[in-house]
Amino acid sequence: MVVAPIQTIGLHKSFGDLHVLKGIDLVVQKGEVVCVIGPSGSGKSTLLRSINLLEWPSEGQVLIDGINIVDPDANLDKIRTRIGMVFQQFNLFPHMTVLGNVMVAQVRVLDRPKEEARQIALNMLERVGLSDKVEQHPSQLSGGQQQRVAIARALAMNPEMMLFDEPTSALDPELVGEVLAVMRDLANEGMTMMVVTHEMAFAREVADRVIFMDDGQIIEQGPPDKVIGNPDSPRTRTFLARVLDPTHIDSATPETADFSIDLSSGQFRLGPTHR
Amino acid sequence: MALSDIRPTVRRRISWGISLGVALILVIAVAWFAVMNWDVLGRQFFNGEVAAKLFPDAITVCLRNTLLYTIICFVIGTFFAMVLALMKMSRGPLRWFAIAFIEVFRGLPAMLTIFAFAFMVPMVFQYRWPIGGIFGGLIGLVCVTAAYNAEVIRSGLEAVPRGQREAARSLGMSIMTTNLIIILPQGLRIVIPPLTNEFVMLLKDTALLFIAGASIGMRELTTFGRDGLTTYSNGTPMIVAGVLYLIVTIPLTYLVGRLEKRMAVKK
């Protein structure tokens, strides 16, 4: 039997009285790209952050390659090196150069020799198109460039899977495309990915599966054409109507929402922006 | 408007009052200067002959020792301060040790701490400090510095955004590695101005080491001033010590201001 890279069993999370995750059962297969969508406060970020235990679940299990990492005996630091994570706010280390950001964990965690780490870092930065920025500090880069560095930093650890927590939500609209392009390449190369996003066009094009979450539960999941194009649940429909056509919140229905977008032109954002 | 009609009058009345007050103080000061015993001041406190005898030891031994003690206490104390700050931010028993340590040594007057380490510890444990009571005194001062700087450093560490720790941990870094290479470098940079300020305070607190006593070569400025006071029955050595303190502290204070301004610009 092939072990799934990511599995959660009966995952619950509460912050005080606030019950954020209400029993999430989820399996992500190797090479699968899963996009998680849903209204803010639905628990999608918390779910993602639970998978590498940035949030400790109140109840339930998280299995990475079949190993229950909620177990206090699990070697969490080691397991985390297999899971790359990209944050909404990039979280680059401001006191290091771009190259330093991509090298530091390789040297400190994987014990790679400096020269080797440097080579890998340079390769990764080339891959995200930032070879000319290696000696700069994060503050000198645009948001899109910073996020691409963050992706390179995660990739330099040779992770088996990548988690993206709203990677484009903090970006100016014109910078979203460059980050999504890097992510699309990654998906095409067969990386196992879980992406919390509001980019419906991206989800539609790249995802193997879309999960719609609301109120701490998985409401609906399936192929993107189904979940985004023709959802079963009324809650999904309402949400999509708001996201895809935010200027007509009152009158829009999912049936009339405009889904037609020319993906071949490389335009990912669909219709008017939702923020 | 009614307000603008009133304001100038009130202001004028206030400024009148201030002028009157200043004039009054000036009159009193002039009267004071007139009756002041300039002769005593010159002979007892600004005595050139006595002052001449104090040099060069005042600088080559005592000012040097003051600076040396300050630097020793600051370096060792700040090292322990980092450890304490990290302990206080952790969970579990270490946290409580750190809290207890910080509260005790911040709550006690520094002079009592120095006294305790210089005299109480050797007596209770039947142990002689290697170079005399001053050694114990320095340990006391290290503890005080560690406690004060721990709070300063903690405030800096807490100012580092939470995402930095999350990013580091998500890359597989241990808590220790995260603290050492991600959090501390950023947190310390934030607290450079207040730490420099603590350095100036510490420099003045080394004066309290006089209570520990010191051999001739170990004296710092205040011990030196007090010894001179008894030797010459003259206050000049104290004045000399004071001037030497100022020569060091004023530029340092100025530096703190510069650092603060630079940090403000960076933000």
Image (cartoon, coloured by chain):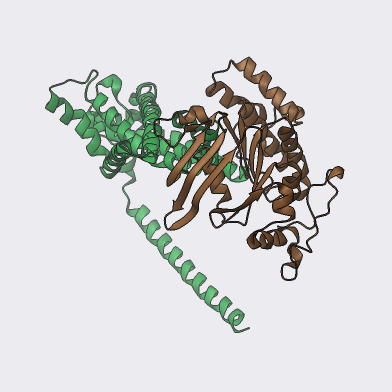
What letter labels the chain drawn in green? Answer: B
Residue at the outermost bottom position:
B2
| Point 76% across, 28% down: residue | A132
Q: Looking at this view, is A52 or B78 the one in front?
A: A52
**Which picture quadrant has residue B136?**
top left
What letter labels the chain drawn in brown? Answer: A
Could you say where residue B173 lies in the image, as x and y percent from the top left? Answer: 50, 29
**Quadrant (top left/top right/bottom left/bottom right) for the N terminus of chain A:** top right
- A154 vs A200: above or below: above
| Point 46% across, 40% down: residue | A61
State left or right for residue A24 relative to residue A128. Answer: left
Q: Looking at this view, is B68 or B130 the one in front?
A: B130
Q: Looking at this view, is A234 or B154 the one in front?
A: A234
Q: Looking at this view, is B127 or B1 the one in front?
A: B127
**Which picture quadrant has residue A7?**
top right
**Quadrant (top left/top right/bottom left/bottom right) for the C terminus of chain A:** bottom right
The reply to whether residue B233 is visible in this rendering is no
Could you say where residue B123 lies in the image, as x and y percent from the top left? Answer: 13, 26
Could you say where residue A33 lies in the image, as x and y percent from the top left? Answer: 67, 39
Residue at the outermost front position:
A1
| Point 57% across, 40% down: residue | A27
- A254 vs B248: above or below: below
